[in-house]
């Protein structure tokens, strides 16, 4: 079953269970998927498209959490954190730091990157292997620090 199909099935089962908080987040996910389908005029059957939507939603919530905590609105930050947990259940397991370091080192060796000019080549390889399993902003910072040395 595709990730999109699993989410739609979970909406039905959550409605039957009466879990309103989880249902709200699942409906946000399905709305985001539908929005992309309508905008692009295509059906999202590929799990990578759905994963990119879910990653975008998690990133938005992380940004909101930092804003809410700066504004001393911990109640709203807690809501965002619970939404991240629900969305995160559909994301693949995150890569460990060691695995990510090895992936970056391998990509640098494969491309023969010598400096920051080659960051795009390295990121292309790393992004293909780590998409959905690592925060790409953190990966970019890691690649940049390795290439600056």
Image (cartoon, rainbow, N blue to C red):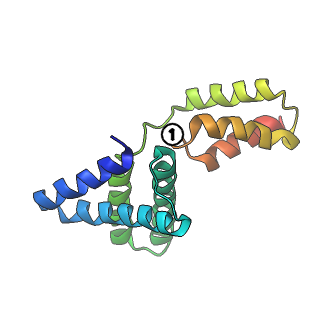
Left or right? Give the position of 64 relative to 21: right
Q: Residue at x 69, y 45 (%)?
A: 140
Q: Quadrant of residue 82?
A: bottom left
Q: Residues within 10 Å of mark 1 (few under 14, many from 20)?
A: some
Quarter of the rendering occupied by the C terminus: top right
Image x and y of residue 32, in percent: 43, 65
Residue 103 at x, y percent in the picture: 64, 28
For this rendering, which residue is in front, 73 or 89? Answer: 89
Task: Name the residue carrying label 1.
Answer: 133
Specify whether 144 is left or right of 39: right
Report how many numbered discs are placed on residues in the image: 1
In this view, the residue in front, 25 or 139, is: 25
Q: Is residue 49 above or below residue 128?
A: below
Q: Nearer the viewer, residue 44 or 18?
A: 44
Q: Is residue 92 above or below residue 57?
A: above
- Compared with 63, 71 (above or below) is below
């Amino acid at each position: 079953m595709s990730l999109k199909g699993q989410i739609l099935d979970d909406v039905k089962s959550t409605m039957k269970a009466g879990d309103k908080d989880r249902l709200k987040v699942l409906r946000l996910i399905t709305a985001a998927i539908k929005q992309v389908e309508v905008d692009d005029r295509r059906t999202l059957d590929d799990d990578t498209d759905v994963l990119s939507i879910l990653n975008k939603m998690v990133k938005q919530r992380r940004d909101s959490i930092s804003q809410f905590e700066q504004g001393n609105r911990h109640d709203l930050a807690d809501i965002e954190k619970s939404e991240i947990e629900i969305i995160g259940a559909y994301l693949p397991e995150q890569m460990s730091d060691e695995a990510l370091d090895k992936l970056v080192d391998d990509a640098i060796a494969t491309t023969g990157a010598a400096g920051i000019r080659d960051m795009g080549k390295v990121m292309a390889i790393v992004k293909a292997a780590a998409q959905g399993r690592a925060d790409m902003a953190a990966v970019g910072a890691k690649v940049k620090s390795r290439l600056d040395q």
